[in-house]
Image (cartoon, coloured by chain):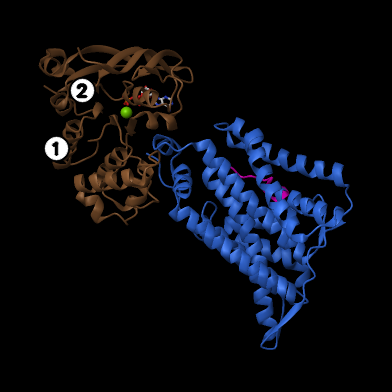
Chain colours: A brown, B blue
Amino acid sequence: MSEALLQVENIEVYYGLIKALKGISFTVNRGEVVSLIGANGAGKTTTLHTITGLLRPKVGKITYNGQDITKVPAHKIVTMGVVHVPEGRRVFKDLSVYDNLCLGAYTVQNKENIADNLAMVYDLFPRLEERKNQMSGTLSGGEQQMLAMGRALMSNPEMIVMDEPSMGLSPLLVNEVFKIIETVHSRNITVLLVEQNSKKALAVSDRAYVLETGNIIMEGKASDLANDERVKKAYLGA
Amino acid sequence: MSEIISTIINGLSQGGVYALIALGYTMVYGIAKMLNFAHGDIIMVGSYAAFVVVGMMSSSPFLAIFIAVVVCTALGILVERLAYRPLRGAPSLSVLITAIGVSYLLQSLAQIIFGATPVMVPMFDFKFVDIGGISIKIQSLITLAVCAVVIVLLLFVIKKTKVGRAMVAVSEDRGAAQLMGVNVNRTIAITFAIGSALAALAGIFSLFVSPVTSPTFGALPGIKAFVAAVIGGIGSIPGAAIGGIILGVVEQFALSVPFLSPYADAIVFSILIVVLLVRPTGILGKKQREKV
Ligand SMILES: Nc1ncnc2c1ncn2[C@@H]1O[C@H](COP(=O)(O)OP(=O)(O)O)[C@@H](O)[C@H]1O
Ligand SMILES: [Mg+2]
């Protein structure tokens, strides 16, 4: 039986009076790739923000590794092993590539560990090494996405949550991003993926949840969902 | 000629003082996204701390400097914790009004404790030195040197250290900084601590020039340094340094010309108007990035 790493139980999240998540529950098991798919405005980003502490649920509970993390502030979630690659990359544009990567390792104390992680990231993204002294604001969209993912990997994550990593990228780069997701997964990092590109997301995932206006309306094995008529019609453009 | 050189040196040294204060304004603005109008009053509290040490206890001016820096640093952290942190996420107008309230509170407290009458704060007995036939006040040279070292040190901390990177990250994107593990509250507290320590030094250097303080001691340097920060581009650290130096040099030149000296303050403030007409974001200020 697989072990639940992240458990989200019946969370309700509000923006002022607007109820963005209407009581959703899902589980991510250790070692899985799970995706959360759904149309624009369904609540995917809200879900990820709530997991990593940028938002707080009004109702419900989030458990990670058996610990209740519902009220843990965002900056402490990283130290517990969950890292968030935010929507729109949000690299620090006024800082160099190198400084961004150092910030990714902000919670890592051991200097050797940081050096090893930096070497690993440069190995995975040679492009970042070439541009290490460049201001991140001058990178292309694809390079910024690489930086956002590299930055996340600097923190020794056990689980990585990614919000639309392929958004706004050329088809070639989209494939690159999905290859990296598989590489990350092959290093025993659990992945929770949010994507608009449902077809590709389902192809790399073990399981998936479909979110619609703040509710989970379907869940199952990714391969089953990919063949489901309703999913095909609504999300796969078939 | 020698008069011009000594005016330049006095101007750079006065500019260094404005720069120290402006750095506090600009760092707090960049990182905490607020205008801390009580910043000038921190200088005043530092001057009274020095007064207690040298004026009341007749102790060493060096001890006075140390105590002033410690008191201001602690006060900066305390004010942030008690007055500003509870308002994080509140509309900026509420924060601004609170800052003005803190400013009056500090001035009133000083008046209650020390009275409204100005008091003497004798620091050091400075002499003039003669460098190549030019007579220069020693305090100008000391002030200039210390300001230069402090500014370079600050730039180094911001560019090259972990806490500096965290400050830049918080100023650019608070949420993303948190996702890196940066404790935003702590980073903002550190920013207030640094800004207030710099303000204490600025207060001490002002006492070198004129050894008298009163509850409104910080008001004029505070507003001038704010102008310096805006001229340099508020939020920009090198901008604050440049703005401060421009202000100091212009002011000293205005003061050195007899028929201009009564208008020195007016001239200083008119630089602001000129700069903002030409470059609304200040000399090194960034254009507001378009938010998607
Ligand atoms: N900061 C906000 N303030 C108010 N409403 C918001 C905010 N962010 C998102 N919403 C609303 O919450 C809902 C879910 O948004 P979001 O989680 O961003 O969706 P998704 O990531 O699936 O596109 C949408 O209706 C959106 O308009
Ligand atoms: Mg989204």
Give x and y (percent) for residue B95: 63, 36
Query: Which residues are the magenta region?
Result: B34-41
| Mark 1 or mark 2, earlier in chain | 2
> Which image quadrant is residue A57 in?
top left
Q: Is mark 1 within 8 Å of ligand 2?
A: no
In this rendering, the answer to whether A78 lies above or below B59 is above
Q: Nearer the viewer, residue A127 or B163?
A: B163
In the rendered image, which quarter contains the C terminus of chain A? top left
Residue A147 is marked as none
In the picture, measured across the screen, residue B275 lies left or right of residue A205, that is right
Q: Is residue B12 magenta?
A: no
Residue A175 is marked as 1
Q: Label 2 amino acid?
A: Glu
Q: Secondary structure at mark 1?
A: helix
Q: Is mark 2 within 8 Å of ligand 1?
A: no
Q: Nearer the viewer, residue A116 or B41?
A: A116
Q: CA distance from mark 1 to mark 2?
A: 20 Å
Residue placed under numbered mark 2 in the picture = A32
Give x and y (percent) for residue B214: 83, 53
Q: Label 1 amino acid?
A: Asn
Ligand 1 resides in the quarter of the picture at top left
In the rendered image, which quarter contains the N terminus of chain A? top left
The residue positioned 18% from the left and 27% from the top of the image is A201
> Which image quadrant is residue B76 in?
top right
Residue A177 visible from this viewpoint: yes
Q: Which tag is nearer the camera, tag 1 or tag 2?
A: 2
In this rendering, the answer to whether A104 lies above or below A207 is below
Q: Chain of mark 2?
A: A
Q: Chain of mark 1?
A: A
